């Protein structure tokens, strides 16, 4: 029995000697067969792939069909190649409707918007991804963020809004605690779940949200109607996007009387 230093070592030993049994990964075996090497498998084990799909907030990816129309990036490798094309074939995803991008910097491509979907492991391109979930953002205890220590970057999802209005709930202490936890990481990059072009992509977006909540609370306490609250917020923040969320938040602060 020959384990080999790696797949290539084990496979080359088996090819050279009919009396040797080798131990290699499934990816290595399939690659060798594809190259026409005279080897056969008589036993195998199967484990679920540890590959995962990563997107930025706002990109819908709930099922294989959602890959249509998207740019899919990955760092080339036997496991990634096999898993990606097996997924496409098994789910009848039309390759004409997707763009597959091989890149040695796929993670940076995702963060910079050059691809829509990143396929890989939580350790992508040698960079660990730390996922923290069950947190309060724009919904209670249903949000998560990804921390990339080597880049000092946070992909914050619906926890962080930058350059836009957002709905401030009456009880937002837990949301503030989530923001404080992200700020404690001292990130240099913060990818907000909702933002407008040119909005800050650093930790200043967290401070903006804290000040926005504080001013909203003060304005709600000193206003007599949703319209008055809305006008105060627009006067303080005249250039923010997503004004529909300001309208919703103002109405929630002054709900219509029950009939």
Image (cartoon, rainbow, N blue to C red):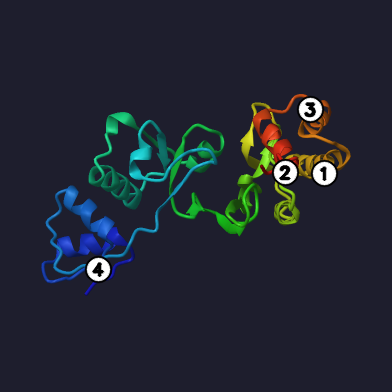
- Label 3: which secondary element: helix
Q: Are marks 2 and 1 in contact (CB under 8 Å)?
A: yes
Quadrant of the rendered structure where residue 50 is?
bottom left
The residue pinned by badge 1 equals 217
Residue 128, given in percent of the width and then of the height, sits at 55, 55
Q: Please, is residue 173 above or below residue 18 in the view?
A: above
Is residue 164 at least partly visible in the picture?
A: no
Q: Residue at x 35, y 58 (%)?
A: 49
Kindly report the distance in space between the C-alpha atoms of the residues bearing marks 4 and 1.
59 Å
Viewer-proximal residue among 190 and 221: 221
Q: Residue at x 65, y 54 (%)?
A: 136
Which disc number belongs to residue 168?
Answer: 2
The residue pinned by badge 4 equals 45
- Label 4: which secondary element: loop
Kindly report the distance in space between the C-alpha atoms of the residues bearing marks 3 and 1.
14 Å
Residue located farthest toward the right when viewing the structure as drawn: 222
Viewer-proximal residue among 128 and 65: 65
Nearer-N-terminus badge (2/4): 4
Nearer the observer, disc 4 or disc 1?
1
Which disc number belongs to residue 234?
Answer: 3
Kindly report the distance in space between the C-alpha atoms of the residues bearing marks 2 and 3.
15 Å
């Amino acid at each position: 029995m020959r384990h080999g230093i790696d797949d290539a070592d084990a496979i080359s030993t088996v090819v050279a000697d009919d009396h040797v049994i080798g131990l290699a990964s499934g990816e290595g075996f399939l690659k060798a067969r594809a190259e026409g090497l005279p080897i056969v498998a008589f036993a195998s084990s199967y484990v679920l792939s540890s590959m995962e799909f990563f997107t930025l907030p706002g990109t819908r990816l709930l099922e294989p069909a959602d890959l249509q129309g998207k740019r899919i990036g990955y760092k080339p490798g036997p496991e990634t190649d096999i898993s990606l094309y097996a997924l496409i074939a098994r789910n009848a995803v039309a390759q004409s409707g997707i763009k597959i991008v091989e890149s040695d910097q796929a993670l940076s491509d995702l963060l910079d918007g050059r691809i829509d979907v990143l396929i890989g492991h939580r350790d992508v391109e040698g960079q660990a991804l730390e996922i923290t979930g069950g947190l309060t953002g724009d919904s209670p205890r249903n949000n998560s963020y990804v921390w990339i220590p080597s880049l000092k970057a946070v992909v914050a999802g619906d926890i962080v809004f930058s350059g836009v209005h957002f709905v401030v709930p009456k009880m937002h202490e837990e949301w503030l605690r989530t923001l404080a936890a992200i700020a404690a990481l001292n990130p240099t990059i913060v990818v907000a779940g909702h933002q407008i072009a040119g909005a800050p992509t650093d930790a200043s977006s967290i401070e903006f949200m804290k000040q926005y909540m504080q001013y909203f609370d003060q304005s709600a306490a000193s206003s007599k109607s949703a319209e008055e609250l809305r006008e105060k917020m627009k006067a303080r923040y005249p250039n923010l996007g997503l004004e529909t969320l300001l309208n919703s938040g103002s109405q929630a602060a002054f709900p219509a009387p029950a009939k």
